[in-house]
Image (cartoon, coloured by chain):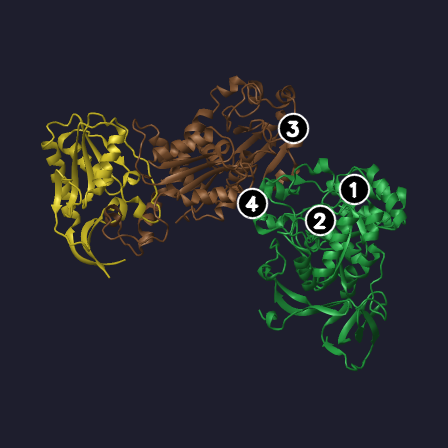
Chain colours: A green, B brown, C yellow
C-alpha cells in the first residue's frame, strides 16, 4: 500500500482541487480524502506538489519492432515515465507496420515484460499503411489496440477514410488521422512562409493540413464515426474542428508541445527543428494556444519521434522528420501556457488526462477503485533538460540545455512508483 | 578595421562595409587579369578543395582558375564521381576532405544550408559557391562589381530581377546585397514563381507579373535562367515564357537608356534573353565572367591566405616592420595602416 | 610592441638634399633618360619616386614616367603575416617591356621586398634593366640584392628599426632609428 500524502489533488473528472491524501492498494486507488492514516502503508510526501490522474500520451513512436537503434519499448517508456506519463499510445509505423494481431500481440507482450508505463498500441488502418486494403482491425482490437491510424501518412483517400470510419464506428474505435495533402506537401521540409523563402527550403503550405482535415470532418459527418486529428498545427484545421463539434460530430484534436512553443521563425538549418507537421507560423501558433485555452483542443500529445543521432546529422533536406518529446511536455505546458497565464493549471491537467481519456473513450480520475495511476509534479522546481541524460536512445530535441520551472516529480503506474526525480539530480 | 571573414556562406549576414571592402579588394585582381603573365605565388603551398556536389562548369572553372592564378593547388570533388552517389553522407565526405587538410573549401551543393552545415563542423574556411536555392554570394558580389563599374555607383539603384525567382539563389543573394545599398528592387516572373514572401526578404522589394511594368526606370536588369533541374511542378512551356518574359530589344527600351543587362549564365539564347540583347552594348555578361574571376581571387586571398588571426607577428619581417610607424600590437600593425588606404 | 627613439638619422632638410643627390646620380648613371622610368614600391617608395621625378624634371627638363607597384601579392612571408593585409592595385600606365627601370623604396633591409617587387615587375613584362634606389640601406641582407643608388648607409642591430616619416603619408619629415623594448 502507498499513501500519497499532502499533495494538491487536481482531478478534472470530479472538479477537485484541494490538498488531499490518496491511498493506493495494489493496482487500484483505495481511498481519497483528507488526513488519511497510513496504517502501515509506505508514505510518499507530496507536500507542495500537484497530484493528478496519470497522464496519457495519445501519440508517440516507440520504434519497436524494427527500428530499435532509435528507440525500444523499454527505453521509450523509461523516458515517458520521466515525463510523468503513465500510459502512451504507440503509432503503428514500425517495421513491420502494426497492421495485424500478431504484431499487436508482440508489442503488448514486450511491453508487459519491459515497459515502465502502460503501452496502448494504435493499429494501422490499412495493410502496411499503404492506403489500399483495410487492415484486420477487429483482430487487432482483440489483441489490444485502442485506436486506428496510418500515421506517418494520411489515410489515403476519402473513400478509404469512409470505409475505415464505418468499420471502426461499429467497433467503437476512434480513427486518428495524420492530415496532409500529398500533392501540396510535395517534397517540402518546413512551413511555407517568409522563413522558408529566406532559407531557400521547400515550403509546405498550411492548406496541406487543413484541406485534409476538412475532408476528414466531412467524412466523419457522413459516417458518424469518432475522428481524432493528430498533431494539429493550423488555425484553419482548428476552425474545421470547431465547426464539426458545433455540428455535434465526434471530432477531437491534439496539439504537440513544440507546436505551442516554437514557430517557423525558429528554423534555421538545425534539423532538430524539422518535424511533420512543421513548425507553424506565428499566427497559427497563437490560434492553437487560443484553442488550448477555450476547450476546442482536447489534448496535448507529444508525437515523441526518436531518430538515432547519425540520421539527423545531415543536410536539412535529407533529415528525417521528428523530435523527441516525453520529458519536456509537461515543463513546456507549464512554461508556455500556465506560468504566462494563458490557461489554468486545472486546464493543463485536463489536456493530459481527461482530454486524452475522452478521445479513447475511457475515464481518467482519482477515485476509489480506479487504476492507481498518478502523475505527481511540481510547478516550481527549477531544472535543466539535458538530452544526454535521457534514457531515450535518441537525442533529437530542440530543447537540450533549456531550463524550466516545473517538472514531473514522480510517476505511479498501477500502484508502483516507476519514476521519482532525484533531489541531487535537481541541483543546477 | 574590418573583421576578418572566417567563411563566406551568404550575403545576408554581411554588412555594407564588408561588401564594399570585398569589391574594393577585387579591383587589383581585375587589373591582374590584364598582365601578360597571370600567375602569382601568393597562395603557393596552399590547397583549395573544390567540392562541387552539384553539377557546375562555369563556377567551378572560375574558382579553379582563381586558385591557380594565385598559385594554390586544388583538390577536385565532382558529384558524378563522388561517393555521395554511393550513399556516403555529406558529413563523411567532408570529414574525408578535411583529413586531407585543404586550406579552404569551395563548396556547391543542391541542399539549402549545406554550406552552413559543413562550416559548423569543420575548422577550415568555407566559401559557398551555391547551396540549393538559398544563396550564391560570389555571384551577387560579381554582379555588384559589374554594376558599380558600369554605372559608377552601387547606391539607390533601380534593379529588376527577371525570371524564376522562387528557385533562384542568385535572386536571393542579389536582393540581400542590393538592398543593403538602398536599391529599389522589382521582381518579375510568372506568378507561381513569385511568392508574396519575397517582399519580406528586404526593404523596397516589389513584385510584378507583367514585364512591361517591371522595366520602367530600371538601371540594371538581372535576367535569370529557367531552372529546369529544380522544378518539381509542371513547367511553363517555352513559348509561354518567351511570350511573357523574354527580354527583347523592344522591352529593353522600356528601361533607362543606359540600363545594363546581367545574366548569371549559362544563357539559353532565344528563351529568357533575345540574342540581340545578349550580344548588345548594354549586356555585361562577358565582364561578369572576368569580374567573377577577380572577386573569387580576392575572396580566396582573404579567406585562405595569411595566418590564422592569432598567429604571432614575427620579429624582423621586412616590409611590415619597416613601414609601421607606431606599432602598438603586432596583429594590429600592418593591417591598420593598410586599411587606411583600403577605400582609395 | 613598444619602441624607444634612439637617434635621428636624417632631418627634413637632409632628406631633401639626399633626394637631390640621388636624382642627379640616376640621370648621370643612366646613359640617357630615353627609356628611364621610376617605379615606387608601396607605400613610402611612392612619394619618394614622385619627388625624384619632379627633381629630374626641374634639373634636366625631362619627364620621366613614374609608376606605383603593390607587392602584397608577391611577398614570400604572407603565411606568417596576420591578419591578411589589404591588396592594392599597381598604377603603371606605361609598358614595362625594354624599360630602364629604377625601383624606389625607403629602406633596404633583408631584400625580400625588392625580390617581391622584381617578381611583380616581371609579371608585367620584361624590363631591359632594373636598378634599385633607396633612401636608407640598413644592411642585414638575406638575399643577394644590392642598391645602385643609396641615400644613407646605416649600421643597425637586429632589434632596431629604421622609421621613415614623409609628409605625404605621415604629416612630418624625418628618418629615425628606434629600438624595440621588451
Asked whether disc 4 touches disc 1, contact meaning CB atoms under 8 Å apart, the reply is: no
Residue A33 in picture, x, y percent from top left: 83, 76
Q: Nearer the viewer, mark 3 or mark 1?
A: 1
The percent position of residue A378, horizontal first and vertical second, equals 70, 69
> Circle 3 sits on which residue?
B190
Query: Which numbered tag is attached to residue A126?
Result: 1
Q: Which residue is mark 4?
A: A314
Q: Position of residue B52 (x, y in %)?
A: 48, 35
- In this view, B124 is above or below A1: above
Task: Report, in whole angstroms, how far the alpha carbon at label 2 lies from the one at label 1.
Answer: 35 Å
Q: Quadrant of the C terminus of chain A?
A: bottom right
Label 4, label 1: how far apart the Cα atoms are? 32 Å
**Based on the displayed image, in which of its 4 quarters is residue A207 positioned?**
top right
Image vertical order of residue A36 relative to residue B297, above or below: below
Q: Nearer the viewer, mark 4 or mark 3?
A: 4
Q: Secondary structure at mark 3?
A: loop
Q: Residues within 10 Å of mark 1 (few under 14, many from 20)?
A: many
Separation (CA) of disc 4 from disc 3 = 33 Å
Report whether mark 2 lies on the same chain as mark 1.
yes
Amino acid at each position: 500500500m502507498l499513501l500519497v500524502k499532502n499533495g494538491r489533488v487536481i482531478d478534472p473528472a470530479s472538479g477537485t482541487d484541494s490538498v488531499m491524501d490518496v491511498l493506493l492498494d495494489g493496482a487500484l486507488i483505495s481511498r481519497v480524502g483528507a488526513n488519511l492514516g497510513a496504517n502501515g502503508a509506505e508514505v510518499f510526501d507530496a507536500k507542495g506538489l500537484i497530484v493528478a490522474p496519470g497522464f496519457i500520451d495519445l501519440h508517440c513512436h516507440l520504434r519497436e519492432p524494427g527500428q530499435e537503434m532509435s528507440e525500444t519499448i523499454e527505453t521509450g517508456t523509461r523516458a515517458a515515465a520521466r515525463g510523468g506519463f503513465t500510459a502512451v499510445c504507440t503509432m503503428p509505423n514500425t517495421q513491420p507496420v502494426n497492421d495485424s494481431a500478431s504484431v499487436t500481440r508482440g508489442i503488448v507482450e514486450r511491453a508487459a515484460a519491459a515497459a515502465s508505463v502502460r503501452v496502448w498500441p494504435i493499429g494501422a488502418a490499412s495493410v502496411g499503411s499503404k492506403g489500399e486494403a483495410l487492415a484486420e482491425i477487429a483482430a487487432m482490437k482483440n489483441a489490444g489496440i485502442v485506436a486506428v491510424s496510418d500515421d506517418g501518412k494520411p489515410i489515403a483517400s476519402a473513400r478509404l477514410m469512409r470505409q475505415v470510419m464505418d468499420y471502426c464506428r461499429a467497433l467503437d474505435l476512434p480513427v486518428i488521422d495524420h492530415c496532409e495533402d500529398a500533392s501540396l506537401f510535395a517534397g517540402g521540409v518546413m512551413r511555407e512562409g517568409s522563413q522558408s523563402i529566406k532559407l531557400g527550403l521547400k515550403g509546405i503550405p498550411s492548406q496541406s493540413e487543413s484541406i485534409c482535415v476538412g475532408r476528414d470532418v466531412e467524412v466523419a459527418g457522413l459516417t458518424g464515426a469518432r475522428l481524432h486529428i493528430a498533431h494539429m498545427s493550423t488555425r484553419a484545421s482548428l476552425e474545421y474542428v470547431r465547426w464539426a463539434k458545433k455540428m455535434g460530430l465526434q471530432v477531437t484534436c491534439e496539439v504537440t508541445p513544440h507546436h505551442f512553443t516554437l514557430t517557423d521563425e525558429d528554423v534555421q538549418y538545425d534539423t532538430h527543428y524539422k518535424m511533420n507537421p512543421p513548425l507553424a507560423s506565428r499566427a497559427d501558433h497563437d490560434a492553437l494556444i487560443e484553442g488550448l485555452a477555450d476547450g476546442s483542443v482536447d489534448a496535448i500529445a507529444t508525437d515523441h519521434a526518436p531518430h538515432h543521432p547519425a540520421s539527423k546529422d545531415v543536410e536539412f533536406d535529407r533529415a528525417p522528420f521528428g523530435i523527441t518529446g516525453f520529458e519536456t511536455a509537461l515543463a513546456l505546458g507549464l512554461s508556455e501556457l500556465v506560468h504566462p497565464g494563458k490557461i489554468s493549471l486545472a486546464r493543463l491537467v485536463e489536456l493530459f488526462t481527461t482530454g486524452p481519456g475522452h478521445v479513447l473513450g475511457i475515464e481518467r480520475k482519482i477515485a476509489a477503485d480506479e487504476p492507481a495511476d498518478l502523475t505527481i509534479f511540481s510547478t516550481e522546481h527549477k531544472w535543466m533538460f539535458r538530452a544526454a541524460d535521457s534514457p531515450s536512445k535518441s537525442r533529437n530535441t530542440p530543447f537540450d540545455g533549456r531550463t524550466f520551472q516545473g517538472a514531473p516529480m514522480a510517476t505511479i503506474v498501477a500502484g508502483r512508483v516507476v519514476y521519482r526525480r532525484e533531489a541531487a539530480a535537481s541541483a543546477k | 578595421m574590418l573583421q576578418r571573414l572566417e567563411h563566406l556562406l551568404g550575403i545576408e549576414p554581411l554588412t555594407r562595409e564588408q561588401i564594399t571592402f570585398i569589391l574594393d579588394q577585387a579591383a587589383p585582381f581585375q587589373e591582374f587579369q590584364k598582365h601578360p603573365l597571370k600567375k602569382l605565388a601568393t597562395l603557393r603551398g596552399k590547397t583549395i578543395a573544390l567540392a562541387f556536389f552539384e553539377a557546375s562548369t562555369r563556377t567551378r572553372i572560375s574558382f579553379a582558375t582563381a586558385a591557380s592564378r594565385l598559385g594554390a593547388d586544388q583538390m577536385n570533388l565532382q558529384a558524378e564521381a563522388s561517393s555521395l552517389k554511393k550513399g556516403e553522407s555529406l558529413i563523411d565526405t567532408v570529414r574525408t576532405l578535411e583529413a586531407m587538410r585543404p586550406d579552404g573549401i569551395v563548396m556547391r551543393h543542391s541542399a539549402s544550408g549545406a554550406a552552413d552545415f559543413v562550416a559548423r563542423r569543420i575548422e577550415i574556411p568555407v566559401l559557398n559557391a551555391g547551396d540549393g536555392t538559398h544563396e550564391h554570394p560570389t555571384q551577387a558580389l560579381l554582379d555588384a562589381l559589374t554594376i558599380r563599374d558600369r554605372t559608377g555607383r552601387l547606391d539607390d539603384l533601380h534593379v529588376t530581377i527577371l525570371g524564376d525567382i522562387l528557385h533562384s539563389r542568385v535572386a536571393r543573394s542579389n536582393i540581400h546585397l542590393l538592398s543593403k545599398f538602398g536599391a529599389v528592387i522589382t521582381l518579375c516572373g510568372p506568378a507561381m514563381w513569385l511568392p508574396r514572401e519575397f517582399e519580406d526578404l528586404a526593404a523596397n522589394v516589389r513584385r510584378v507579373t507583367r514585364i512591361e511594368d517591371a522595366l520602367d526606370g530600371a538601371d540594371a536588369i538581372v535576367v535569370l535562367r529557367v531552372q529546369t533541374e529544380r522544378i518539381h511542378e509542371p513547367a511553363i512551356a517555352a513559348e509561354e515564357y518567351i511570350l511573357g518574359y523574354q527580354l527583347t530589344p523592344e522591352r529593353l527600351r522600356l528601361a533607362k537608356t543606359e540600363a545594363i543587362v546581367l545574366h548569371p549564365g549559362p544563357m539559353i539564347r532565344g528563351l529568357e534573353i533575345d540574342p540581340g540583347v545578349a550580344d548588345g552594348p548594354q549586356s555585361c555578361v562577358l565582364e561578369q565572367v572576368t569580374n567573377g574571376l577577380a572577386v573569387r581571387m580576392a575572396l580566396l586571398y582573404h579567406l585562405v591566405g595569411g595566418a590564422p588571426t592569432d598567429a604571432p607577428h614575427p620579429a624582423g619581417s621586412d616590409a611590415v616592420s619597416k613601414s609601421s610607424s607606431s606599432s602598438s600590437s603586432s596583429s594590429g600593425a600592418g593591417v591598420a595602416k593598410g586599411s587606411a588606404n583600403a577605400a582609395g | 610592441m613598444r619602441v624607444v627613439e634612439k637617434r635621428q638619422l636624417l632631418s627634413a632638410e637632409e632628406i631633401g638634399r639626399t633626394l637631390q643627390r640621388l636624382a642627379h646620380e640616376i640621370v648621370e648613371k643612366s646613359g640617357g633618360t630615353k627609356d628611364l622610368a621610376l617605379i615606387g614600391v608601396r607605400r613610402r617608395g611612392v612619394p619618394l619616386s614622385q619627388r625624384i621625378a619632379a627633381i629630374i624634371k626641374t634639373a634636366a627638363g625631362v619627364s620621366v614616367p613614374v609608376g606605383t607597384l603593390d607587392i602584397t601579392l608577391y611577398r614570400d612571408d604572407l603565411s606568417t603575416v596576420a591578419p591578411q593585409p589589404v591588396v592594392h592595385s599597381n598604377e603603371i600606365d606605361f609598358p614595362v617591356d625594354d624599360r630602364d627601370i629604377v625601383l624606389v623604396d625607403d629602406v633596404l633591409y633583408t631584400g625580400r621586398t625588392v625580390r617581391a617587387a622584381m617578381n611583380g615587375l616581371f609579371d608585367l613584362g620584361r624590363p631591359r634593366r632594373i636598378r634599385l634606389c633607396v633612401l636608407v640601406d640598413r644592411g642585414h641582407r638575406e638575399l643577394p640584392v644590392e642598391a645602385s643608388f643609396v641615400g644613407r648607409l646605416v649600421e643597425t642591430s637586429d632589434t632596431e628599426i629604421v622609421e621613415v616619416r614623409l609628409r605625404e603619408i605621415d604629416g612630418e619629415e624625418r628618418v629615425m632609428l628606434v629600438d624595440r623594448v621588451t
